[in-house]
Image: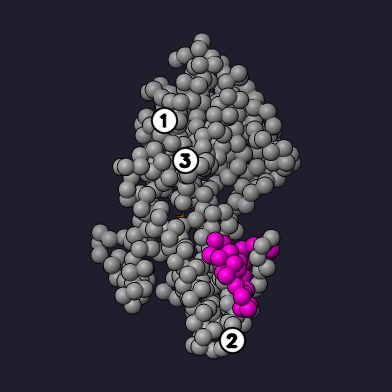
């Protein structure tokens, strides 16, 4: 495959836009499609609608040299990349309707020799389903096109680096599709490209995130045990990790984001009997947030009983993980909401140094909130918080290891 191809990406979000920009940056003509016309206009001005380091530079350059344009319509191309969300429907069942809609949009434009790649996180069997859908509408294309699944595995905040340097797992519906997809990624990926089949590639993405979820659940479970056993969980984990074959992750106030707290359900939903541990890990990580909210409530009550007045409380951190501005599916945000719901007379300061304002939470400066509060609750281990000195006149509730 040469760089003389044309690419259409369907979906210009957190993965679709960086991927489109990177491919275009490498000298390939890309037309990105998004249903949101504001997103389309923003990109065509060379600007971006998401927060991601380095992305602006790539988009600006690619739009200016004419290799990247955005459109509300799917355009004809040699390679179609489907990078749309797969949310939930009902009780944590994966909803692949966006992947289906994207495929249906591309179908009338397909021609012999085209390559279609699905990158959206998808339940096992989705790529085969899309093959059936394509052939049902265009039977003459049977065995004339290539179709593969290749999950993204980039970490928000480091996307532009990881898109180039991470290894990729690529699984076609047949060997020749796998080969074609490998040729495509070779045009812009430096990491190794690993061949497999579509079902394994689909499950691989779900497995990666479920594996991390299970490991975090283990750490969170330990934190509950240690709370009862009067042991410092951070010290315990540090000590246990001195063993050459033990590597325990960190407990926190729950698991958030749009991937790790979501993808394991795609396995549980399709294989409920077999996925006991994966399902239990989801429960444990969700329970941890509930437990933290209860702990805060109890601490507020005991302060009132002891001092005959309501405390001032600082809720430190709202993002779903340290040093980012992303509040989607954030356990800290859930806990903050619980604290508001239960609040009576106490003053509550909400702190999130990575954003300037929020619709629900009136935000305070982190040093001010810390100094003015009787109870300080650390929910997210943002770097700023680590500079605050512990004092004996405050109750410190450290759920994310600020002072570990
Ligand atoms: N967390 C802990 N303890 C830890 C590590 C994380 O409580 O020791 C929590 C975080 O605070 C956060 C959640 O887990 O709430 C998820 O954070 P993360 O940094 O583990 O992962 P994400 O969601 O930012 O990105 C993950 C990555 N997957 C894996 O590491 C297996 C990334 O590579 C994927 O591309 C991304 O999901 C995705 O898009 O699927």
Location of residue 144 in the rendering, given as x and y in whole percent from the top left corner: 48, 14
Residue neighbourhood size for the residue with mark 1, other residues' Cα within 10 Å, grouped as few (<14), some (14–19), many (≥20): some
Q: Earlier in the sequence, mark 2 or mark 1?
A: 1
Q: Are the residues flagged by discs 2 and 1 in contact, CB closer than 8 Å?
A: no
Residue 342 among magenta residues: yes
Location of residue 277 in the rendering, given as x and y in whole percent from the top left corner: 32, 50
Q: Secondary structure at mark 1?
A: loop
Residue bearing the label numbered 3: 93
- Which residue is depicted at the point 58% across and 56% down? 326
Q: Secondary structure at mark 2?
A: loop
Residue 226, quarter of picture? bottom left
Location of residue 100 in the rendering, given as x and y in whole percent from the top left corner: 54, 29
Residue neighbourhood size for the residue with mark 3, other residues' Cα within 10 Å, grouped as few (<14), some (14–19), many (≥20): some
- Which residue is depicted at the point 30% across and 42% down? 274
Residue bearing the label numbered 1: 125
Front tag of 2 and 1: 2
Residue 37, quarter of picture? top right
Image vertical order of residue 223 relative to residue 53, above or below: below
Distance in Å between CA atoms under marks 2 and 3:
46 Å
Span shown in magenta: 333-358
Distance in Å between CA atoms under marks 3 and 1:
14 Å
């Amino acid at each position: 495959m040469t760089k003389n191809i044309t690419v259409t990406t369907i979906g210009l979000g957190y993965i679709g836009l960086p991927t489109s920009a990177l491919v275009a940056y490498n000298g390939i003509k890309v037309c990105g499609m998004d249903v949101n016309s504001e997103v389309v206009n923003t990109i065509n001005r060379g600007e971006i609608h998401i927060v991601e380091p380095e992305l602006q530079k790539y988009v600006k350059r690619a739009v200016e040299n004419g290799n990247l344009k955005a459109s509300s319509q799917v355009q004809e191309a040699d390679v179609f990349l489907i990078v749309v969300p797969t949310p939930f429907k009902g009780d944590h069942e994966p909803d692949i309707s966006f992947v289906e809609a994207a495929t249906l949009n591309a179908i009338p434009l397909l021609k012999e020799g085209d390559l279609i790649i699905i990158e959206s996180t998808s339940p096992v069997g989705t790529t085969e389903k899309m093959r059936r859908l394509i052939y049902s509408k265009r039977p003459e294309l049977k065995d004339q096109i290539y179709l593969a699944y290749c999950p993204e595995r980039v970490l928000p905040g480091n996307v532009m680096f990881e898109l180039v340097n991470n290894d990729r797992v690529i699984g076609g519906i047949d060997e020749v599709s796998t080969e074609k997809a490998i040729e495509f990624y070779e045009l812009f990926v430096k990491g190794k490209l690993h061949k497999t089949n579509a079902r394994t590639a689909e499950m691989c993405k779900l497995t990666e995130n479920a594996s991390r979820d299970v490991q975090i659940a283990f750490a969170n479970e330990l934190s509950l045990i240690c709370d009862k056993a009067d042991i410092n969980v951070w010290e315990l984990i540090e000590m246990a990790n001195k063993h050459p074959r033990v590597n325990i992750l960190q407990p926190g106030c729950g698991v958030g984001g749009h991937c790790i707290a979501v993808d394991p359900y795609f396995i549980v939903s399709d294989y409920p009997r077999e996925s006991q541990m994966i399902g239990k890990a989801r429960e444990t990580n969700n329970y941890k947030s509930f437990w933290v909210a209860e702990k805060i409530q109890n601490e507020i009550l005991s302060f009132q009983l002891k001092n005959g007045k309501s405390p001032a409380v600082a809720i430190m951190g709202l993002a779903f993980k340290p040093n980012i501005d992303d509040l989607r599916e954030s356990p800290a945000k859930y806990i903050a909401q619980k604290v508001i719901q239960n609040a009576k007379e106490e003053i509550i300061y909400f702190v999130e140094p990575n954003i300037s304002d929020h619709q629900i939470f009136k935000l305070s400066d982190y040093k001010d909130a810390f100094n003015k509060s009787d109870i300080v609750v650390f929910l997210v281990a943002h770097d700023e918080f680590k500079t605050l000195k512990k004092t004996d006149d405050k109750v410190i509730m450290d759920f994310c290891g600020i002072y570990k």
